[in-house]
Amino acid sequence: MVVPMRRLYFLLICPALMQASPALGKARSISSTAVENATLDEARKREPNPALVKAQILLDRLRFSPGAIDGRRGDNTRLALQTFQQANHLKATGDLDQQSWDALTGTDGEPLLQDYEITKDDVAGPFVKVPEQMEEQAKLKKLAYSSPLELLSEKFHVDEELLKALNEGKDFEQAGTRISVPKVRAGKLGKVERIEVDKEQKAVRAYDKDGQLLAHYPATVGSEARPAPSGSFKVTKVARNPLYTYEPKNQFKGVEADQPFDIAPGPNNPVGTVWIEINKDGYGLHGTPEPSQIGKTASHGCVRLTNWDAEDLASGVTKGDPVEFNETS
């Protein structure tokens, strides 16, 4: 379904920082068979490895999001696993021990990876080279994906390097190419009654009316220069494909404009594909053009999620839902 674009104007205190992703190096080739048959022992081997890919896919399906599936140990995966352990009454270490591995791999018998045929729409574009300077971004008609590879990576919640490692030698720019992709979560999130932003652990959690955890997402929450708020707020608006308006009074580093300007919607828009506004001027929860940076770099006060996690959260949120900013869970 095509979601109609909404124009969204707000005092933007919190654009995603346009920092480059850290260079992880080329991922070694990983076969779908290796992922399906991975054992816990392999999780301790050289990264990326098939056991961690397996664990991350299963966590994603259960909405204990590890962020971008990359087959590597990291804070986002550790926190997702720790939350899974807590929810299943296991020792909450964040480590992938045998008990946790058995509980996780026993959740369903579905294949972990699936074949996908790249469509004409996947490669049709238009694709854009996104400049770093916000003033230059404002000249673009759409902050679209930069390549079919980026589009497919976000579609299947996977790091670009890992997607290439799962499909060595495949042409991602050719419709009809068959590739192997993670079989990630499907369907909408249940009805959210409360959102918790854990500022210390850098996480967002959604709960239902009975207080049961619906979803956990890794997040970037504020910065030292402009910390996220504390206390209780409410959702005032959910906007998909938002227009981003820069206000000069915010004086973002590297932006020299002395007049407001707009940046067009798109997945590489500074607030990504979703803006969940709260009743604190200029603050909200939103997506990002840099999914690999979630939980690693600072934002300007807001709560930043991967685009797919922001979209998932938005599917269960309605106006008036409480949002609690806590120092720790």
Image (cartoon, rainbow, N blue to C red):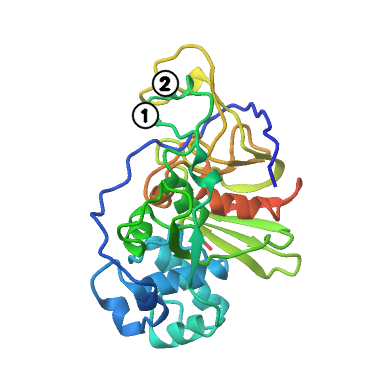
Residue at the spot of label 1 = 132
Residue at the spot of label 2 = 136
Q: CA distance from mark 2 to mark 1?
A: 8 Å
Q: Quadrant of residue 224?
A: top left
Residue lying at 32% horizontally and 40% vertically, measured from the top left: 20
Residue lying at 48% horizontally and 37% vertically, measured from the top left: 268
Instruction: Report x, y in % for residue 169.
Output: 30, 57
| Whether residue 100 is visible | yes
Instruction: Report x, y in % for residue 40.
Output: 35, 83
Residue lying at 73% horizontally and 58% vertically, measured from the top left: 193
- In the picture provided, is 244 more to the left or to the right than 188? left
Q: In the image, is residue 153 above or below residue 77?
A: above
Number of numbered discs overlaid on the protein picture? 2
Would you say the residues marked 2 and 1 are in contact, meaning their CB atoms lie under 8 Å apart?
A: yes
Q: Secondary structure at mark 1?
A: loop
Return the residue found at the far top.
Answer: 258
Q: In the image, is residue 218 above or below residue 109?
A: above
Is the residue marked by circle 2 packed among few (<14), some (14-19), or many (20+) residues within 10 Å?
few
Instruction: Report x, y in % for residue 55.
Output: 43, 74
Q: Nearer the viewer, residue 168 or 3?
A: 168
Residue lying at 62% horizontally and 55% vertically, measured from the top left: 312
Residue 144: mark = none
Q: In the image, is residue 60 above or below residue 293?
A: below
| Whether residue 95 is visible | no
Q: Secondary structure at mark 2?
A: helix
Q: Nearer the viewer, residue 16 or 266?
A: 266
